[in-house]
Image (cartoon, coloured by chain):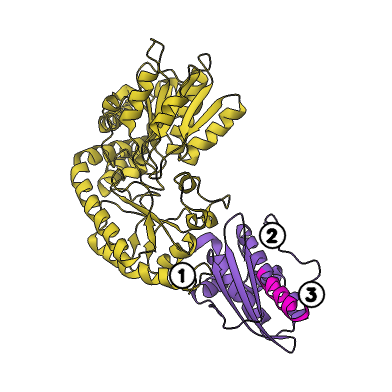
Chain colours: A yellow, B purple
């Protein structure tokens, strides 16, 4: 059966070149990087190289990269670690209304521990309201965490402007609050430069740019205090102990190197596919309404809500045609709740469950998009004919 | 297969039975789940106290469509009394099971049917089902 994989926000294939680079550390050298003998040194050198490659992707210094096990860990680490390290300065944290659960859930825990959390609203395109952000900053604010780009609606946030607001908010010589960016969906896909953007901490995950699963990183600007996440030996500068996932780290390094080297050509292809899909949907599925910002959006991302029908049904029918997509419908959420992201951008309640996300990658072809545009409209029509919401 | 749907569920999802609007139905049941947002409409034709035809329209996931389809199958040809005894559990059994998180869809199907019978009784006798109201959202989860 045809397989058209359009769920790159959920997972990506491991690039062949990445897998090849990892192999010697999966079935070959097994030394513990902390060991002093040769096998250990080989592993430690491999990690050093990967750290440079990952740092280079986001224009950081190698010593500012801490390897973790996944994007969720990086986000949890950043929030808990930065909040606890700055607790004496204040207990106020700011975030946006459209963050991933790996931001919102740890913040709920921090609230229970006595921190105060402000959720800044977004506009109809999902862009953080900068004036509201500005107003929310108080002398008690120690940490601000904003996503770089949303996995659900694809909107890219104005990180540089946000950073500037944060720096200007405390013009009296006091230290500005820490700025953490969840860049799991963005890093490796669009250019991310932590220096020009003025970021203190940033989460990124390898599987978003064709590295393996189970490996991610937290960038932490030199001099930024954080509480360790895992305590034990002194791996990762003592901030995240535990024997390193050597093959994963090596894979993430190679994937970062390739992402940087090939970003221009990958982006050109993704933008072409994105335009093709957006144009095609506009003419073939008039009841599809784009969510997120049409311009300020990830190049690999087209999301929207379809009138009168529900996302799980759509994705199941697409699956039968060999097309893999995701949906933010309540029916597939663990809590059976409507997506907080779609509600935050003002999608009407009767529309949120019609959510569907098409996300593509460097190996997606125009033929794949053609196939989707051929199969999707009749599925929409069929489900709409079954819907009590569509009259006549 | 999503969430471990049975082959039977997939059958009824792929090719739902009795789907679509009914001309001049004798009873209409319209129910919605306020939590997940699913909406079902069931239509029945009744002759001599027997449900001669049942149809549905559903906005919802695979399980919601499959349970609507199965419910209409199960009650066709039954007397109103017999049909009222078809519980959400009977629908789940006939579908060879549902994932626990999707059980509420079967409750919605039961409510839609009862709503349609209630509507029919109201129209014909002026009295609906005694003490009937749709389940609360928490039930069936």
Please tell me whether mark 2 sits on a helix, a strand or a loop: loop
Secondary structure mostly taken by the magenta-highlighted segment of the chain: helix
Please tell me whether mark 1 sits on a helix, a strand or a loop: helix
Dot placed on the residue nearer the N-terminal end, 2 or 3: 3
| Disc 3 from disc 1: Cα separation | 34 Å
Q: Are marks 2 and 3 on the same chain?
A: yes
Q: Are marks 3 and 1 in contact (CB under 8 Å)?
A: no
Q: Nearer the viewer, mark 2 or mark 3?
A: 3
* Residue B113, image x, y percentages: 67, 73
| Disc 2 from disc 3: Cα separation | 27 Å
Marked residue chain, label 1: A
Number of the label disc, if any, that sits on residue A213: none
In terms of depth relative to the viewer, which is nearer, B70 or A245?
Answer: B70
| Vertical comparison of A382 with A49: above or below | below
Question: Dot 2 corresponds to which residue?
Answer: B140
Q: Which residues are magenta?
A: B112-128
Question: Dot 1 corresponds to which residue?
Answer: A384
Residue under the image location 28 percent in, 24 percent down? A195
Marked residue chain, label 3: B
| Vertical comparison of B20 with A16: above or below | below
């Amino acid at each position: 059966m045809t397989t058209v994989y359009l769920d790159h926000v959920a997972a990506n294939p491991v690039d062949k070149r990445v897998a090849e680079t990892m192999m010697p550390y999966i079935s070959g050298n097994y030394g513990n990087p902390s060991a002093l003998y040769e096998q250990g040194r080989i592993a430690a050198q491999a990690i050093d190289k990967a750290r440079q490659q990952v740092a280079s992707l986001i224009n950081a210094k190698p010593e500012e990269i801490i390897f973790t096990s996944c994007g969720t860990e990086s986000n949890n680490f950043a929030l808990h670690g930065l909040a606890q390290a700055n607790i004496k300065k204040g207990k106020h944290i700011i975030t946006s209304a459209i963050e991933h659960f790996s931001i919102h859930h740890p913040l709920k825990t921090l609230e229970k521990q006595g921190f105060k959390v402000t959720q800044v609203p977004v506009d109809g395109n999902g862009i953080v309201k900068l004036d509201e952000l500005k107003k929310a900053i108080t002398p008690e604010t120690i940490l601000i965490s904003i996503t770089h780009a949303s996995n659900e609606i694809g909107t890219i946030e104005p990180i540089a402007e946000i950073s500037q607001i944060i720096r200007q908010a405390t013009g009296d010589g006091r230290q500005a609050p820490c700025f953490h960016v969840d860049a799991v969906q963005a890093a490796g896909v669009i250019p991310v430069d932590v220096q020009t953007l003025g970021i203190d901490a940033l989460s990124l995950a390898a599987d978003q740019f064709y590295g393996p699963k189970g490996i991610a990183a937290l960038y932490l600007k030199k001099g930024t205090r954080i509480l360790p996440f895992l305590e034990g030996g002194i791996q990762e500068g003592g901030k995240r102990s535990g024997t390193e996932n050597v093959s994963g780290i090596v894979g993430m390094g190679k994937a970062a190197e390739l992402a940087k080297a090939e970003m221009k050509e990958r982006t050109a292809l993704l933008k072409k596919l994105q335009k093709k899909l957006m144009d095609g949907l506009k003419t073939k599925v008039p009841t599809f309404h784009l969510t997120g910002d049409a311009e300020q959006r990830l190049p690999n991302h087209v999301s929207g809500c379809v009138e009168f029908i529900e996302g799980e049904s759509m994705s199941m029918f697409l699956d039968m045609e060999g097309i893999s997509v995701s949906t933010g419908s309540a029916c597939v959420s663990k809590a059976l709740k409507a997506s907080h992201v779609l509600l935050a951008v003002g999608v009407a309640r009767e529309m949120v469950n019609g959510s569907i996300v098409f996300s593509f990658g460097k190996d997606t072809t125009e033929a794949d998009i053609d196939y989707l545009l051929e199969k999707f409209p009749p599925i929409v029509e069929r489900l709409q004919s079954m819907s009590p919401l569509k009259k006549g | 297969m999503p969430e471990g749907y049975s082959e039977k569920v997939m059958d009824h999802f792929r090719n739902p039975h009795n789907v679509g609007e009914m001309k001049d139905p004798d009873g209409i049941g319209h129910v919605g789940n306020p939590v997940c947002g699913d909406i079902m409409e069931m239509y029945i034709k009744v002759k001599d106290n027997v449900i001669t035809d049942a149809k549905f329209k559903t906005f919802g996931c695979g399980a919601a469509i499959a349970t609507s389809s199965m419910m209409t199958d199960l009650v066709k040809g039954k007397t109103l009394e017999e049909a009222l005894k078809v519980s959400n559990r009977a629908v789940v059994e006939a579908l060879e099971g549902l994932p626990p998180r999707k059980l509420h869809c079967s409750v919605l199907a039961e409510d839609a049917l009862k709503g349609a019978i209630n509507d029919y009784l109201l129209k014909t006798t002026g009295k609906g089902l005694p003490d009937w109201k749709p389940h609360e959202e928490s039930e069936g989860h």
